[in-house]
Amino acid sequence: MNYTKEIDKKWQDYWRSIRLFNVDTKERAVKKYYCLVMFPYPSSELHVGHARNYVIGDAVTRYKLMRGFNVLSPMGWDAFGLPAENQAIKHKIHPKEWTLKNISRIKEQLNSWGIGYDWDREVTTCLPNYYKWTQWIFLKLYEKGLAYRKEAFANWCPSCKTVLANEQVIGGNCERCSTPVEQKKLKQWFLKITNYAERLLEDLKLLEDWPQRVKIMQDNWIGKSYGVEIKFPVKGIKETIDCFTTRVDTIFGATFLALSWDHPIIEKLMENNPYRSKVLEFIERLKNQPLAPRLIESFEKEGIFTGRYVINPMNNKELPIWIANYILSEYGTGAIMCVPAHDKRDFIFAKKYNLPIVEVIRKDNFNSETDNINDAYEGEGLLVNSQQFNGLTSSEAKEKLAEYMEKKGIGKRAINYKLRDWLISRQRYWGAPIPIIYCDKCGEVPVPEKDLPVMLPEEVEFLPTGQSPLTYVEEFLNTTCPKCKGKAKRETDTMDTFVDSSWYFLRYISPRNENLPFVSDDVNYWLPVDQYIGGVEHAILHLMYSRFINKFLYDLGLINFSEPFKRLFTQGMIIKDGAKMSKSKGNVVSPDYIINKYGADTMRLYILFMGPSEKDAEWQDEGLLGSWRFINRVIRLLDILEEYKDTDSVKELNSTEQALLRKMHLTIREVTLDLEGNFQFNTAISRIMELVNHTYKALEEGVVRKELFREVVDTIFLLLSPFTPHISEEANCILGYNTSIFKRKWPDFSEEYIKEQEIDIAILVNGKVKEHLKIPANASQKEIEKRVLALDKIKSIVGDRTPKKVFYVDKKLVNIVI
RNA sequence: GGGCGAGUGGCGGAAUAGGCAGACGCCUGGGACUUAAAAUCCCAUGUCUCGUGAGAGGCGUGAGGGUUCGACUCCCUCCUCGCCCACCA
């Protein structure tokens, strides 16, 4: 047998013809396995870096098939989004055309690699039969009060006259023209993911088979913190300002209070205030500061005194109210009690504006320099300068102060999350229209379900005006109010593509259903997803949004599982010449070239063999050649077998045969463990390589009966089939099987064959290996020790000293201490 | 600044409920086959020292300490690199 392109084609056609990967979701008799690979964004053809994802998924799918599961392995396209629209603007090609063209190209690639999918379930998010249901989910959220509209800032490029996504803002500038990005306030749609903050956090504990780091990232992203919200009365007017702090223990060290520039109380503070014009001028300036650089710590802190004071309710001291550019309006209350002695940011600010610094926490009991503080001490310690709370530790003080404040009505315990509501409005064309209508009489009216989908019009001009392109499509914009039948206008923003991808895994179960987004009974059977595979770059957004939408649908009673993905595997990137593979860097390796020259299995094998799949790996062309060599070496066994002359097989297996049989069973065990564990494909493959090497050695050195040789070869291909399906299927055919190798059973191993008659004991003296000894497996410890000490070499090392102690590790080693 | 992860031959990487470091592959060198090349096969391949030699001995998992009969693995201190988040009070 020779491995040629024709073999790839032959078996790909065969798998399609026997519908190997097509699944009936009504099937209940055979246990199910849902293997899901993150669907791609079809922006260009795939390179080997992308291929890793699909190759891993396919190996899992095929392995599980052989383990007797009814495996669902679907594929689709995350097809809405910005790149398509940018192409439209640049090259005057319609986003739909561009997207569909890419889809067919990528599909062709996936097929040429022999990746097995149930293409009958293909899902494309930019087509009406899909986005109808994205809109439907939006309406459900709206119905439950979880979708709402409010004013929010969007990144705005004044030169391109367009709204930019956060990813298009590079270092505070527009990605295309490098103009500094400004903030523009627009009425936009949000999803209330914050309502689910606690559950999203709490349920991370249920995700035992998720990588720890992904859970930690989500945990940090949700960012739960415990603290106290303190009311500060404003001097002279009947108002209070609430401040959230996690460090109540530093309350006596507060020397000023700072507000974010858009804090609602500012207006009141400015009434009859001589500072008014200066302050408003300052605010105006902050407003136009680009968002992105404001996030960088080194950004210069700036502020202005408002002329007003609050009273510290604990000691009645007056604290000046400032407005400062480092206060986030979206977190907590947008107002902060500032403790320069114990917060770096406040410290820098206080130094700059000459505000007092009062130490209230000491690392230890010893006197330290009180008047000469040159840095903020942010750790915990003992309280000083804090009246009756002096001497308490920070954690004691936090408790006592919270209690005290709650009793006196000064403040109350509070919990804050970093998680913000999900802004889903995009002032863009290529996305699912938000199904809302605005009527002068009735106001905001949701599109009735029966009118879905709100079709995205195809005839659109892309004018860089900053308005959504849909605003200029009269037939789309103008409509009638579903309530009063009067004239009304449609929402012209479209949804963030993360909405599309937050439920696609449900649609795969009933992809063509026209009455429902999914059939609950079937979804409840097939989900949660048994194995989800994708890149870590989605660790936060996509995985969090999907969990959110899943929980929402769970609350509606439409599904009965609260988490969508039982197991998650995040694969590493493929690196070339020290950088992530990308077209712009010019370091992409084309899979098409490899496949034409070496076949799909060579690429697949190398991708899986190059290193642990969850880690980044450096692509080396020479490594690929190693896989090619190995494949040919394996295949040659078939030719050898065909011409093999059987020996007079005596009943008893000779020692070569025994060793070969043992190696085979051992390999089955190890490969199975590697696959059942955390997908250690690289070691699984190296073990098969060992078995192949062993087989060649055995053939060379001794008499191996044909029957056994054949069994070994058969096993080798069974073990290889998830990784190199084409040659394995071919081999399976040559070996005389007339069903697909993937319809056969994964090989079993028997401990009995793995047991050894004779074992090798390493002999160490003071922890260093000095000698080896072969002994019968059933030898007793005493016997072994006796034989070890009787060895010439050991005798000469030990001399006439008596060993202090002899350690024996069962069937492994003896350590003699002298 | 915070969080997470990782440092093992010339290279990708094996081996962690503590137990023979360097599996498997690549590169390189030597040999066989060949008119020749490719392909293939065989041998060698961490490093240093001693020895003509067979061989013998030492050192070795980022650095330094510790625990242990025994440490790539556990503990402490430090260094370097990567990723994610980042003024979250």
Image (spheres, coloured by chain):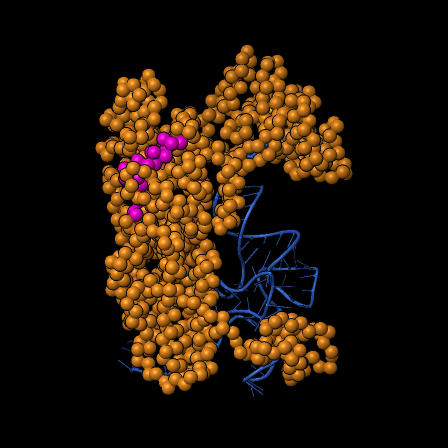
Chain colours: A orange, B blue
> Which residue corresponds to the image point at 38% horizontal and 59% vertical from the top-left?
A68
Spot occupied by residue A128 in the image (x, y as percentages of width and height)? 27, 37
**Could you tell me which residue is drawn at 46 percent across and 29 percent down?**
A289
- Foreground residue among B19 and A390: B19
On the image, which quarter does residue A55 sit in? bottom left
Residue plotted at (39% across, 38% down): A558
Check the picture and name the quadrant holding the N terminus of chain A.
bottom left
Residue A302: quadrant of the picture: top right
Where in the figure is residue A789, as x and y percent of width and height?
A: 67, 80
Q: Main secondary structure of the magenta part?
A: helix
Whether residue A666 is situated above or below residue A197 in the rendered picture: below
Residue A86 or residue B5, whichever sits in front: B5
Q: Nearer the viewer, residue A107 or A362?
A: A107
The spot of residue A108 in percent (x, y) is 27, 53
Residue A712 lies in the magenta-colored region: no
Q: Quadrant of the C terminus of chain A?
A: bottom right
Q: Establish if A240 lies above or below A534.
A: above
Please state if A745 lies on the left or on the right of A461 as rendered.
Answer: right
Q: How many marks?
A: 0
Residue occupying the point 36% across, 80% down? A706
Please, which residue is most extreme toward the right here?
A: A366
Q: Is residue A698 above or below residue A274?
A: below
- Which percent across, then down, holds residue A799? 71, 81
In this rendering, does residue A456 appear at all? Answer: yes
Q: Which residue is most to the top?
A: A272
The verdict on residue A126 being magenta is: yes
The answer to whether A425 is drawn above or below residue A766 in the figure is above
Q: Is residue A596 visible?
A: no
Q: Find the magenta span and give its range.
A: A121-141
